[in-house]
Every structure is written in C-alpha cells, then in structure tokens.
Amino acid sequence: MSNIKEKLFTEFEVPTTQEWLDKIEVDLKGADFNKRLVWRTNEGFNVQPFYRREDVLKMKTPDALPGEFPFVRGNKKKDNAWYVRQNIVAADAKEANAKALDILNKGVDSLGFKIPRDLVSAEFVEELLKDIRCDIVEVNFKTCPCRSLELAKILVEYFEKQGYDKNLVVGSIGWDPIKKMVMKGKDTTSVLDIAPKLVEVFKDYPQFRCVSVDTIALNNAGAYIVQELGYALAWGNEYLQQLVDAGVDADLAASKIKFNMGVSENYFMELAKFRAARMLWAQIVKQYEPKNDDSCKMCVNAITSKYNQTLFDSYVNMLRSQTEAMSAALAGVHSMVVTPFDAPYEKPTDFSERIARNQQLLIKEESHFDKVVDPGAGSYYIEHLTESLAVEGWKIFLKVEEEGGFLAAVKAGTVQDDINATNVKRHGDAAKRKEFLLGTNQFPNFTEKSDGKRAATKKCCCSGKDNECEKPAFKSIESTRLAADFEDLRIHTEETRVPTAFMLTIGNLAMRQARAQFSCNFLATAGYKVVDNLGFKTVEEGVDAALKAGADIVVLCSSDDEYAEYAIPAFKYLDGRAMFVVAGAPACMEDLKAAGIENFIHVRCNVLETMKEYNAKLGI
C-alpha cells in the first residue's frame, strides 16, 4: 500500500503559483489579469481568482480550534446546532400565546415577542407565556427601552414563580437605546443608565442576555458587510465600556451582550463575516481582562436582510433568504430568523411564515448543517475572506474609537453619514445595473402587476406618546430598500398608462435577438409592455407592424454595423408616430444623432433615469 501511495504522490508534479499565473496569462491572450480576474470588492480589499496553501500558512485563523479562544471557529465543539427563531408581535397576549404554542409544534425552538410599551405588565407576561416551557424553549423579548427594566423584573419574578433552573433559561431582552439614536436621530441617552440595572436583574441567569447590538438595522439600510462588522464591534464595545465603568464585573458585562446582525446575499463573504466578528469581539473583551475565556464568546442572532427584498417577483425573496440562511448556519450563529418573503409589502401571512420556518428546517433537518462545526475552516478562500474582513472591520472600529467611541460618533453623525453614503451609492449602482436585483432591475417578469401591493411602513413603538422621542437631536439613517426606486417607477407606470414597446428586429440574427432581449428587459423594469419579434425583411415592414400593434415605442434591434444602414430610414419612415429607440451604442451614433435620433439604450445607461425620461416623453 505504501508503494502505491508513493507512486501516486510522485506521478504528478505540483505546479507552483507562478506556473499557474503563467498559464492564466496565456489563456487571457493579452488581457489584463487584474482587470479581468481580480474582484474589487466593496469591502475595501481585492479577491484573487485562486488561492493556494501558501496563502494561508501565514494566517493564524486555521490554527484555531472550535469552542476555544478566539472563537473564530465557533462557540461550540461538538456540533453546529442553532435555534430556529420566529418573532411575534404580541399586541394581544392570548393570541400571541396561541401562535407561539402552534409554531413550537412546527419546528421552532426560539420565540421572539415584541410587546408594545403600554402592555408591559405581570398579567400580560403570565398570559403570554402560558404553557411555554422557558427552560426548554429560548424566549426573547423586545419593548420600548424605557420599559425594559420593568419587563426584566416581571420576567425574573415569573421564572422564579415557575421554579425554573436559572442555568436552563435561555433568552434575551432586546434593550438597545442607541439604535434609535442611529436610525432616527432621537436622543435616548436618558435611559442608558438602565444597562447596569438590567444586568443586575439577570446576573443569576447565565444564559439570558439583556443588552442588544442591533446592527441588523444597518444591514437593512444598505451597509456593506465590513461596515456592519466594524460598527457592531464599536457598538458592542460602547455598551461593554459603559457597564464596566458603572462597576459591573467584566465577565458578567460581556456575558449579557447579544448581537442581532443581518445577513445579505454575498454567500461566502457573509459566512466569513461572522467568523471574523467572533474573533475580533473576543479580542476586544480580552482587553477587559475577564477571568474566563468563555466571557469572550460572541452571541449572534442572525436575521436575513430586508434591504435586497423586492415587492415585484417576491418569490425570488425566498432564494435570497435561503442562501443567506445557509451563510449564517455554516458560520455557526447562535440563532436565526428568516425574514418572510412578503415582508416588504404586507404583514407576513401564515403561508410566508411557514415557508420561512421551513427554510431553516430544510438546511437543518435535511441538509444536516447542524452536524459539522465550522465546515468552512481550512478553505483557502474563506480563510482569506475572514482575515481580510477582520482587517478592514478593525480599521472602522479603531476609527470610531479615535472619535471617542460609538456613542460620540453617533452624536457627531459620522456613522449615519457613512451608512447613508453607502445607501446612495448602492441605489446608484442598482440604477445602472452594476448591482443586480433579479426580477426588478434585471430580468423582470414582463406580465406581472402590483395588484395593490405597496411598500410596508414601520411604526414607532412609542406610538408618538413620548415627546422626547419625537424630537430628532442627531442625524438619522435613510433606510430604503434597494428595489424601492424601480418599484415606485413601475407602480407609477401601472397606475397611469402602460406603453407598448415594439422590437423592430432586423439584420444579423444573433445580434438582433440579443439586443431585443436586452431591450425587453430594460424597458420592462418600468412596467412597459414589450413585444418581441422574430425579424423583418425591411424596416418599413417592421414599422408598419409596430404601428398596427399600437406601439408607443419602436426599438430598432440589429448589429452596430447595420445601424448605419437601417436606423435613419426606419426613423424617417416612422416619422414621429411613435418614440424611436436604437438598442446599442454604435460607432455611427453621432451620425444618427445628427439625423434627429436621440434615444439609445445600452449597458452603460442609467436604467432608472432613462426610464423616468421616457415616461416624461410619453406623458406618463
């Protein structure tokens, strides 16, 4: 056997990195390696097209072990199990309780109750938790920050009344007043001193956390992965520092902080984000000299993003959230919430909530994602992403610390400015289709109608009763989904008048078909009715067919070379009876413009602005 192995090993020579690069250079045929194959990420670093063992030998992350400091490979040693969580708006205790008991029988083992501030009471909690074993099921609660301490005392009293083993109660209170400062610009500094009191209430419950870092809000506002990572660290450190300054033991303080983080569609990058986050948070907590390394563990509840969800072609949201759930699961999070596919436009239905639950159960019970600890470990690519994100995220953390900490940065507005700038950039990239949204700015469903669907609005938990909460004291974050601009345009078209765009296909078969498909996708993003065709022998025949079909727009689809022959005759024959568009940016464009042709659509166009312009020309 040893001879066979020796022969197998010696039969093939191991190519060097330079040999790989030489081969790639030959295959590129003179094209620039960096421009063609190196991915320039939005996260501040480049990704190479391939990695080798030598690239990770200098890294420390592959040497880490599961369940051991700095926890880059996860908090557990034996498995990768996570809590399947579903959130419930508890506006009615009895109804919320019935729903909780129902979903507990359908695979959920973590509940999240959002309790309106006016309903916080012992009687409400008692009815809400009736028949729910809080020493078996994870229970999480959220209410207005100013009522959280009262809720905490009620919960502890309830747990003691039920006789629960304090070591078995797993859950959290989502107390995060800084979130309202970041997102709404409202001054909530008056309730920051509640933190040590909350910790004191739950000090005997080692698995119950009561201070939250809700960077899901940044994720849903369009933050890049490295921004969410860096600000999560700074946000968490702000609370940790305040607790320690208030006299709370470092181990206890760190063990009471929970991170609610988002998951976007960048599969491997998101997986690496959680690995990097655990590693960096462990290093931060270590600086407070805790007595136990377990205090350095980062507890993360992952929530799939709303930022990339869409109102049109909404079933695609299931595909988005499924890959996001996979990223979070493989990364070893504590718990997970899959956002229902219809969340952008309505209160999630029983059907959409069932699908969201089953998305987690699918990867857990059928794909066994819960069996292997940190399956991404050792992958050259994932290890590189983990380290690169850690480096860039740490830069953001240090920058915030130099500004005086996260709270000071929020008051100064630098965090809000950073996220808002990213949101604006991403909306601009979506308008130019540099960032794709399947079914919205790329490959829209040509025949879909909104059917009355409109973007959902969010209400403040304070219900406008707290005057202080209503006065913005700082800058705020403009949180708008990436698809919102296209959705507004499409709904406007649908409600006003839907024009017909006719593809006048002629000439080179391959080019006319490709350009017709491109043009149909382009124009349908605004809800236009598009009519494709197999081809016409003459432009006159095509124009006549377009007018017979009641076309508002005639799109000439051919090859660049043939536009010099077809475009001007077609334009003149149409004679203003419909808008004339040329699909492409041919070399003869200036000649065509000189003849009066002014509309061209091509890959360099800003699709959103172009379609707004066409609507204006058509009187829509």
Image (cartoon, rainbow, N blue to C red):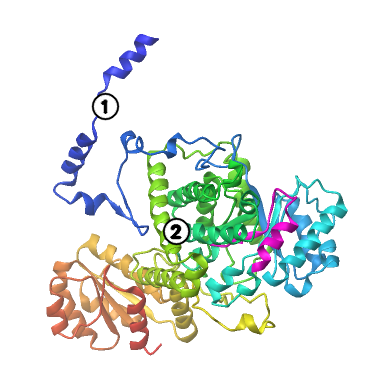
Find residue 389 and report its horizontal and vertical position in percent: 41, 51
Between the C-alphas of marks 2 and 1, the distance is 41 Å
In the figure, residue 337 lies in which quadrant? bottom right
The amino acid beneath tag 2 is Phe
Residue designated by label 1: 14
Residue in front for this viewpoint, 357 or 16: 16
| Element assignment for label 2 | helix
Q: Is residue 514 above or below residue 598?
A: above
Residue in front for this viewpoint, 59 or 195: 195
The amino acid beneath tag 1 is Val
- The question of residue 202 being in magenta is answered with yes
In the figure, residue 609 lies in which quadrant? bottom left
Find residue 183 and report its horizontal and vertical position in percent: 54, 73
334 lies left or right of 158:
left
Label at residue 57: none
Callout count? 2
Q: What quarter of the picture does the N terminus occupy?
A: top left
Residue designated by label 2: 397
11 lies left or right of 595:
right
- The question of residue 452 being in magenta is answered with no
In this view of the protein, can residue 528 be seen by the observer?
Answer: yes
Q: Is residue 179 above or below residue 293?
A: below
Q: Which of the marked residues, 2 or 1, is nearer the chain's N terminus?
A: 1
Question: Which stretch did the figure color magenta?
Answer: 193-215
